[in-house]
Amino acid sequence: MTRSEISVCLTFDFDADSAQIRQLEEPGRISKGLFAVRRGLPRILSLLNKHDIKATFFVCGWVAEKYPELTKEIVEKQHEIAAHGYLHEYFDTLSIYDEKTIIDNTTKILKEFTDKIYGFRAPYFKLSSNTLQLHAEAGYIYDSSLMADDHPYLLSFPELKYKMIEFPVEWFLDDWVIFETHQHSPEVAFNIWKKQFDAILEMEDIAPGYRIMNYTFHPACIGHAYRINVLDRLISYMKTKNTKFVRMMDVAKELLTNK
Ligand SMILES: [Zn+2]
């Protein structure tokens, strides 16, 4: 990869109404999650198809069970599905036993759709000190929940001889924070995403092959009409810069092989 080249992982956390159901919320809140199912996810799949891009979808085990047709469609369109808890749990509050049960159960459910389950993202980006090691033991090769860098890095568990790739996230790039928490306008959102992309493209302290960016989106958020148009515009802009759009599992395998 030369300095002019950059790879982008578009990632979508398909939570649907999982968090609302776990927290016993009322129908109004539940309906906000259901927007992902009725409108958000279909719009995203159609946009990715239009641009001929493959992406990564973090899917809760419960969501895959409740919406098998949509989950199947993601896989059939050759996107990646990866784990995102069973019912969008706070992993930092769970016992090691409960974490392991959730990880094993979710992995089993997702593997009914494809045997290529390699990645995990913690709901709310919150992990316990056991979460990553438990995923490594379960065969996962990457995580995307931490924030220690702005391009992928290696996580080692020397005593276990496991290695994982970390695809770091950031709150300021997360569509939920931009649109729902701060109610920013489409122009502000576009500028944040574009400016970070432009800066990473030029940053000289990133080693060759590691100029890889990661955006976090949620179908219930980015799927709204004016917001999906912003994503469309962003993808079109990135395409003018010789961007490769990649699935996380493919990058993780490549980086681990080169280690
Ligand atoms: Zn989530």
Image (cartoon, grey):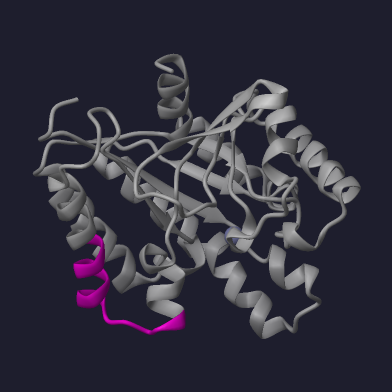
Q: Does the magenta stretch include residue 184?
A: yes
Q: Residue furthest toward the front?
A: 159
User: Residue shown at 40%/84% (left/top)?
Assistant: 182
Identify the image quadrant of residue 172.
Answer: bottom left
Q: Position of residue 228 (x, y in %)?
A: 32, 63
User: Compared to 32, does 112 lie above or below?
Assistant: above
Q: In which quarter of the image is ligand 1?
A: bottom right
Asked whether residue 254 appears in the rendered view, the answer is yes
Residue 205 rendering spot, x and y as whole percentages: 21, 42
Quadrant for the C terminus in the image: top left
State the residue lying farthest toward the right: 97
What residue is rendered at 81% in x and 36% in y?
A: 104
Question: Which of the pair 102/150 is nearer the observer?
Answer: 150
Q: Where 174 falls versus 44 (above or below)?
A: below
Give the residue at the far top of this rendering: 257
Q: Is residue 189 left or right of residue 239?
A: right
Q: In this view, does 122 lie to the left or right of 74?
A: right
Q: Which stretch did the figure color magenta?
A: 181-193
What residue is rendered at 46% in x and 55% in y? Answer: 147
In the picture, measured across the screen, residue 239 lies left or right of residue 99, that is: left
Q: Where is residue 102 in the image (x, y as percent from the top left)?
A: 81, 46
Q: In which quarter of the image is the N terminus?
A: top left
Magenta: main secondary structure: helix
- Residue 43 locus on image (x, y percent): 40, 56
- Seen at 71% across and 25% down, the residue is 159
Q: Can residue 89 be seen in this view?
A: no
Q: Number of labelled discs?
A: 0
Residue 28 among those drawn in magenta: no
